[in-house]
Image (tube, rainbow, N blue to C red):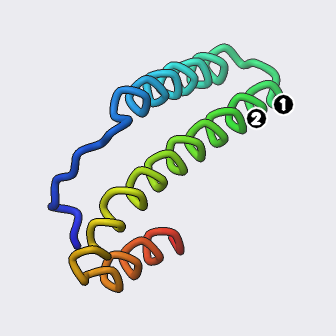
Amino acid sequence: MDSSKSTVQPNKQQLLNRLKRVEGQVRGIHNMVENDRYCVDILNQIAAVQSAMNKVSLALMEDHTHHCVANAIKNNKGEEAIDELMTVMKK
């Protein structure tokens, strides 16, 4: 399995909505830095963005596992799919 493969994302719109919210949060952090806001306030917003990105990542990993990895296992390519997923998780 490689990154050039295309897959169907069953929760694509939910992921896109979450990413739009994160994008707005990052723009807000940019504005906070520009406006010399209190460092702790900025750090709290960064923590919120990191948490939101973790949720996006977990949702995507769940979809991948339930669909791509499950299909790979059915097609006797489970070890390859699991190794690929574990490589990404280690990053």
At 38% from the left and 28% from the top, the residue drawn is 16
Residue 34 vs residue 77: left or right? right
The part of the image, by quadrant, that contains residue 47 is top right
Which residue is at 65% across, 24% downward? 33
The quarter of the picture where residue 36 lies is top right
Q: Position of residue 24 (x, y in %)?
A: 51, 19
Residue 40's label in the rendered image is 1
Residue where numbered disc 2 is placed: 43
Q: Secondary structure at mark 2?
A: helix
Tell whether label 2 touches label 1 (CB within 8 Å): yes
Q: Residues within 10 Å of mark 2 (few under 14, many from 20)?
A: few
Q: CA–CA distance between discs 1 and 2?
A: 5 Å
Q: Nearer the viewer, residue 87 or 64?
A: 64
- Give left or right: position of 56 versus 14: right
Tag 1, which secondary structure?
helix
* Closer-to-camera residue (79/26): 79
Q: Amino acid at mark 1?
A: Val
> Looking at numbered disc 2 in the image, what kind of residue is underneath it?
Leu
Q: Residue at x 54, y 27 (%)?
A: 26
Q: Position of residue 82 (x, y in %)?
A: 40, 78
Quarter of the image where the N terminus is located: bottom left
Q: Eyeballing the image, is 29 above or below 91?
A: above
Q: Position of residue 17 (x, y in %)?
A: 43, 23
